[in-house]
Image (spheres, rainbow, N blue to C red):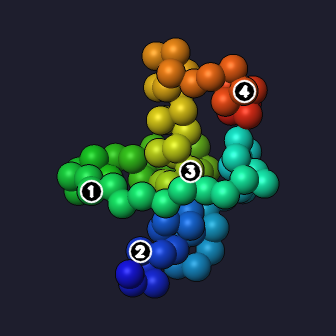
Amino acid sequence: MSEADEAEMNGEADGVREGPPPASPSRGRERKSMLLRLDPAVHEALARWAADDLRSTNAHVEWLLRRALEQAGRLGPEDRRRAR
């Protein structure tokens, strides 16, 4: 994995975190890594949206997934408490 890929996975760009760290619902817990392949246009749109909200792209994707899971009723009560 390249250094740039690793920085992106860690929510950093050019070795510098983009904006303040997000309020992480899993703070203090081990985090899972996964490879996600995206269409370049989707990635660019996500990166712009994340930058507008002062989040890293990685943190923004996690925020979007949590929001979708919550709306679909797929998060348990304990997960919902951690997500806030």
Dot 1 or dot 3: first in sequence order is 1
Determine whether label 1 and label 3 are within 8 Å by CB. Answer: no
Q: Quadrant of residue 82?
A: top right
Task: Give yes or no for contact between labels 4 and 2 (Cβ–Cβ under 8 Å).
Answer: no
Label 1 crowd bin: few (<14), some (14–19), many (20+), radius 10 Å: few
Placement of 51 over or under 81, stated as above or below: below
Pointer 1 residue: 37
Q: Earlier in the sequence, mark 4 or mark 3?
A: 3
Q: Which dot marks residue 59?
A: 3
Q: Amino acid at mark 1?
A: Arg
Tell me which residue sits at (56%, 63%) in the image: 11
Q: Amino acid at mark 4?
A: Glu
**Counting residues from the N terminus, which is met first, the one under dot 2 or under dot 1?**
2
Labels 3 & 2 near each other (Cβ < 8 A)? no
Place of residue 54 in the rendered image (x, y in percent of width and height, measured from the top left): 61, 50
Image check: 81 left or right of 73?
Answer: right
Task: Answer whether labels 4 and 3 touch (C-beta < 8 Å).
Answer: no
Q: Which mark is residue 5?
A: 2
- SS assignment at label 3: helix
The residue positioned 62% from the left and 22% from the top of the image is 76
Q: Closer to the observer: label 1 or label 3?
A: 1
Q: Amino acid at mark 2?
A: Asp
Q: Which residue is mark 4?
A: 78
Residue at figure coordinates x 48%, y 68% from the top left:
8
Marks 3 and 2 sit apart, C-alpha to C-alpha, by 15 Å
Q: Earlier in the sequence, mark 3 or mark 2?
A: 2
Image quadrant containing the N terminus: bottom left
Q: CA distance from mark 4 to mark 2?
A: 32 Å
Q: Amino acid at mark 3?
A: Ala
- For the residue labelled by badge 4, is the local secondary structure a helix, a strand or a loop? helix
